[in-house]
Amino acid sequence: MTVSASSPSRWETQRSFDELGRPLQDVTFCVVDLETTGGSAKAGSMITEVGAVKVRGGVVLGEFQTLVNPHTQIPAFIAVLTGISNSMVTDAPAIESVLPAFLEFAAGSVLVAHNAPFDVGFLQHFAEQQGRAWPAFEVVDTAVLARRIITRVDAPNCKLSSLARLFASTTTPNHRALSDARATVDVLHGLMERVGAQGVHTLEELKTFSARVSPAQRKKRHLADGLPHAPGVYLFKDAAERVLYIGTSKDLRRRVRTYFTASETRSRMGEMVRLASEVASITCATPLEAEVRELRLIAEHKPPYNRRSRFPEKVTFIKLTREVWPRLSLVKKIKDDGADYLGPFSSRAMAEKSLTALHETFPVRQCTHTMGRAPRRTACVLAEMGRCLSPCDGGVDHHTYAAMVRQLRETLLQRPDEVVEVVNAKMATLAEEERFEEAGVHRDRLASFVRAAARTQRLSSLTRCRELVAARLEDDGRWAVHVVRYGRLAAAGVIPSGADAHLFVDQLRLAAETVLDPGETPGPIPAAAAEETERILRWLESPSLRLVDVEGEWTCPVGGAARDLARYAPPADFVRAD
């Protein structure tokens, strides 16, 4: 563990804090970065390194750096990402001694991190675990601040690596804690320089800063006047009544008003508002109904200023065909053909990564020929390499090939263990040989497969149900009720105060949308877009929910892919390409 004092930073080559405005120059910032064994402390991930830089008035006051013994094996793909191996942390102190030392170092300062919920969340978790009171730190997130300030003209995104290049940081982020913290210091100073000329003089102004809107935007505030204070969907339209943008809110009028104030930070939204001449709205019974309507309307109108959900049809699936000699293939649609499907994938590239991971584990044929039960063809190169059982030349009997396909089907639909074990073993071998780039390729393939398998299993668990009725106690004390059929939202309502709940639910079911039975072998998205079913699942998994009735089964396999998500396919806020 090292704590050191440092000389003034490169801030001397930038504008001074006097130009940025006081009292920012009097604030002591502690910029912190962590490396960990996974994406979730609650799921058992541990800290492997802590790095921090304390700075005030542009001068670095000190640095804190230490490796941390996680008392568990560091996964191979994490070692590839960070370069921190098990041998490096063997003699390092445990988090029980590192955390109090860090808290002493950071005492009295404002914590700064790039993607603060990740780093601060880990520290808070272990403080709670140790029974240690968490200090009342104020927190500045440079990722959030950058998204309010930096345009696409400045940088392609707000990743730490991109911002470090933009602000000519003297330290290149490399997934090591102290280096990333040093780079974040330079990013923080660069962001402060950007907002200094716009009247940001205090810490509070910095934390709440947003880009100023133009007078033309402010003049259009009247567009929100006729909207209700209710949940629903709003549609910005131009003079020709073309839909420009679609959004949702629990309070339509309040949300639309923000597009004409300084709280709206997205530059493209300023452009959209300049073109808008009307805002239409659709009132919904519940926030979930609003979310679902939003998705369906975006898919229908494909508004130019919506980035997500515009093309739900542009997805890819991995299909295990129903043939004499089955194979895996990439397809764009699910058919009622009895085949098994994995997905959907948002891009063909992600599907190809998963397909490669499956082919590395299961030597099914990769040729596209239609073959009878006794084919007579010449073996391909893959057969000679031992990567295909070669049914084309009689290299395998039908019984043996079918047994392997049954294992493959179980991997797709139930347990991903075989793929996880095979690919993880390859990553470990490559990491030991210091072939980190190759190991990284395998890590990406495994992550893609695990995400897809977990997604398929979650979606299929709901799309199998003919009808599911659930209710949840909302913040206003009323019960919101939803009817879901084959993964599609069929009806939504709120039980009025004093009403007969059973009668209300019965009437809601009678008035619900008719969703046709997709058959005995439904794919993962038979009746709705995957994103709609996922929104419904998140609502069903929320607190205070009560199941009213289920026709069919709503289950996920105990040994399914979901258990591997935190380890092999952590959320995007963990795998930071910085």
Image: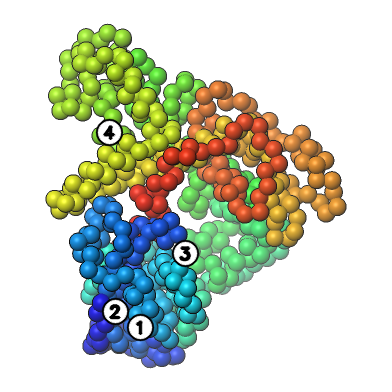
In terms of image quadrants, where is residue 418? top left
Relative to 23, is 379 above or below? above
Q: What label sits on residue 105 in the rendered view?
A: 1
Q: Secondary structure at mark 1?
A: helix
Q: Amino acid at mark 2?
A: Phe
Q: CA distance from mark 3 to mark 1?
A: 38 Å
Q: Is residue 180 visible?
A: no
Q: What label sits on residue 361 in the rendered view?
A: 4
Q: Amino acid at mark 1?
A: Phe
Q: CA distance from mark 2 to mark 4?
A: 44 Å
| Residue that label 3 marks | 267
Relative to 514, is 304 above or below? below
Q: Which residue occupies 28% across, 57% down? A: 74
Q: CA distance from mark 2 to mark 1?
A: 8 Å
Q: Amino acid at mark 3?
A: Ser
> Is there CB contact under 8 Å for labels 3 and 4?
no
Q: Amino acid at mark 4?
A: Thr
Residue 82 x/y as whole percent = 25, 60
Foreground: 38 or 254?
A: 38
Position of 240 with respect to 375 (left or right) is right
Specify which label sits upstream in the sequence, 4 or 1: 1
Q: What label sits on residue 64 in the rendered view?
A: 2
Q: How crowded is the residue under tag 1: few (<14 C-alpha within 10 Å), some, or many (20+)?
A: some
